[in-house]
Image: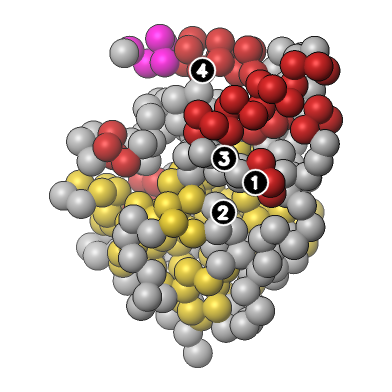
Amino acid sequence: MTTPLRTALSHAVGWLADRRIPRPLRAPIFEAYARFTGADLSEALPPLHAHASLGAFFVRRLRPGARPLCADPELVPSPVDGRVQTLCRAREGTVLQAKGRSYALRDLLAGVGGDLDLEGAAVWTIYLSPRDYHRIHSPEEGVLTEVRRVGGCRFSVAPKVLARRDVLAVNERAVLRIETARGPLLLVLVGALNVGRIRVVGVPADHDGPLETPRELERGGELARFEMGSTIVLVAPGGVAEPLDALAEGQAVLMGEAVGRYLP
C-alpha cells in the first residue's frame, strides 16, 4: 500500500471513529469491540454510553485505582499499557527495532536531545494494541520542555511488521523531552496506520519545538494519548536508568508497573 493510500485510509478511519453513535447502540458496539480485541471493559470508567463515538471509547479513562503506580521512587514506571517489543542499549548510535533489525537513534529523535551523550542509553520499546488503554503517563516528576512533531509514513507498528521493515524512525511521531531530578528522559510517541492523531496534554496540536513555558509533570500524571494503538520508545541516557533484569521482550506490562530502575 502506498503512503498516500495509507494516509487516506487513516483519515477515513479517523472520520468513522469520530461519528456520533446513537446512545442505545453505544454499549452493544463497545462490547462487541471488546470481544473482538480483548479489551477489559470492567476497568473502563462507567457508564459505557458516556462515550459518544468509537474514537472517544479508544481513549477511555479507567476506574480509580485500576493502574496503581509502583510506590518505590527508585523504580521507573511504564508510561503505558502494552507489550515490550525490545529492550536494549544504544551502541554506536543504533538501537533495536526488532530482532535482526536496527535503526539510528538520532533519526528517531529528530534533533531532540542533540546535546546529550546517548551512547549506552537504555531504550524501552512498548507496543500498544487496540485492546490497550491508550493514554500515556509521565514516568517521572519533572517538566516537559520540548515537543517535536515529525512528519512521516503511517506503516503499521505491529511486531510482525517491525521485524521485516524500517518503521519507528520513519513514521509520524512526537518526540518529548522531560527534565527530571534524575536526569533527562526522552519519550517518542510513534504514530501508525490509522493513528494520525497524537495529543499531548496542555500543548497545542500544531506546536513543534521547545515549550516557551515548560509544563510541570507529576510522576504517573497524564501526559498524552494515542487515538488508537501504537508504540512508545522511552530513552534514558546512560547513567540515568536501566531496564529491570526481570523484564523480558514479549512481556505484557500495565501503566504504572515497574519496568526499570534509576541508577545512583
Q: Gap between marks 2 and 4, in whole Å?
A: 22 Å
Residue under the image location 79 percent in, 23 percent down: 52
**Residue at which label 1 appears:** 135
* Residue 125 among those drawn in magenta: no
Residue under the image location 29 percent in, 48 percent down: 97
Residue 146 at x, y percent in the picture: 63, 51
**Residue at which label 3 appears:** 39
Q: Is residue 137 above or below residue 48?
A: below
SS assignment at label 2 = loop
Residue under the image location 37 percent in, 27 percent down: 155
Q: Gap between marks 2 and 3, in whole Å?
A: 15 Å
Residue under the image location 27 percent in, 37 percent down: 160
Type of residue at label 2?
Val
First in sequence, mark 3 or 4: give its number. Answer: 4
First in sequence, mark 2 or 4: give its number. Answer: 4
First in sequence, mark 1 or 2: give its number. Answer: 2
The answer to whether residue 208 shows anywhere in this view is no
What mark, if any, has residue 238 been given in the picture? none
Q: Gap between marks 3 and 4, in whole Å?
A: 22 Å
Q: Give the side of residue 44 with respect to residue 262, left or right.
A: right
First in sequence, mark 3 or 1: give its number. Answer: 3
Q: Quadrant of residue 213?
A: bottom right
**Residue at which label 2 appears:** 80
